[in-house]
């Protein structure tokens, strides 16, 4: 290594880790995180943005956020398993509600649809016309029923 070049360590320091953890915990306020991590007041005020721009700090934050996302992730399968546990361990309304939610998630649920109509029919011809109109309405909205 030449005399004038510095060797950079590509590992995160404890102070940088503290900064990252404080940054994530306090709502992403870099200045407050720098002070909490032990950086001097003036350094924290002036250079906290530079700490965030550091490649190693960015990588650490990205990994921490990915880990947090994974821990908080509620997958479709997890939700179904959890609802099944609730349905199996409770009775009556709670179990029925859990089963209804599972049905909705799996697409096995469609709400009841009703059509109310007052129709005056004076002849068989009117009845045939009404039936034809009702058939067309039903065919048009068949997917919804």
Image (spheres, helix red, strand yellow):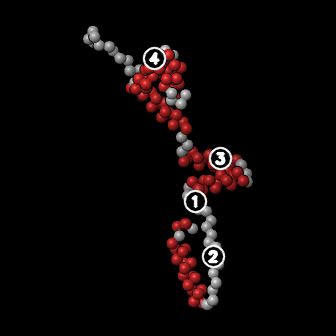
- Residue for point 49% across, 30% down: 64
| Circles 1 and 2 in contact, beta carbons < 8 Å | no
In the picture, measured across the screen, residue 121 lies left or right of residue 4, that is right
Tell me: residue 128, above or below residue 73. below
How many numbered badges does the structure rendering display?
A: 4
Q: Which residue is mark 2?
A: 117
Query: First in sequence: mark 4 or mark 3?
Result: 4
- Residue for point 65% across, 51% down: 98
> Which is more toward the observer, 10 or 140?
140
Q: Nearer the viewer, mark 3 or mark 2?
A: 2
Q: Which residue is mark 4?
A: 43
| Circles 3 and 2 in contact, beta carbons < 8 Å | no
> Which is more toward the observer, 103 or 142?
142
Q: Which residue is mark 3?
A: 85
Q: Secondary structure at mark 2?
A: loop
Q: Give the x, y percent position of residue 66.
A: 48, 34
| Circles 4 and 3 in contact, beta carbons < 8 Å | no
Q: Give the x, y percent position of residue 42.
A: 47, 16
Local packing at callout 2 (Cα closer than 10 Å; few below 14, some 14-19, many 20+) is: few
The CA span between labels 1 and 4 is: 59 Å
| Circles 4 and 2 in contact, beta carbons < 8 Å | no
The CA span between labels 4 and 3 is: 53 Å
Residue 9: which quarter of the image? top left
Tell me: residue 134, above or below residue 69. below
The CA span between labels 4 and 2 is: 75 Å
Residue 121 in sight: yes
Local packing at callout 1 (Cα closer than 10 Å; few below 14, some 14-19, many 20+) is: few
Q: Secondary structure at mark 4?
A: helix
The CA span between labels 1 and 3 is: 19 Å
- Residue for point 52% across, 23% down: 32
Q: Which residue is mark 1?
A: 108
């Amino acid at each position: 290594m030449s005399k004038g070049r510095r060797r950079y360590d590509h590992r995160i320091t404890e102070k940088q880790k503290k900064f990252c953890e404080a940054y994530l915990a306090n709502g992403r306020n870099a200045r407050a995180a720098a002070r909490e991590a032990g950086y001097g007041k003036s350094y924290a005020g002036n250079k906290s943005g530079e700490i965030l721009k550091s490649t190693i700090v960015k990588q650490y934050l990205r990994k921490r956020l990915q880990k947090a996302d994974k821990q908080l992730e509620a997958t479709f399968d997890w939700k179904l398993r959890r609802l099944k546990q609730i349905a199996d361990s409770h009775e009556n309304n709670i179990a029925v509600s859990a089963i209804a939610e599972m049905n909705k998630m799996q697409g096995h649920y469609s709400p009841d649809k009703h059509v109310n109509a007052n129709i005056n029919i004076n002849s068989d011809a009117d009845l045939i016309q009404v039936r034809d109109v009702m058939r067309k309405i039903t065919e048009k909205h068949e997917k919804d029923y």
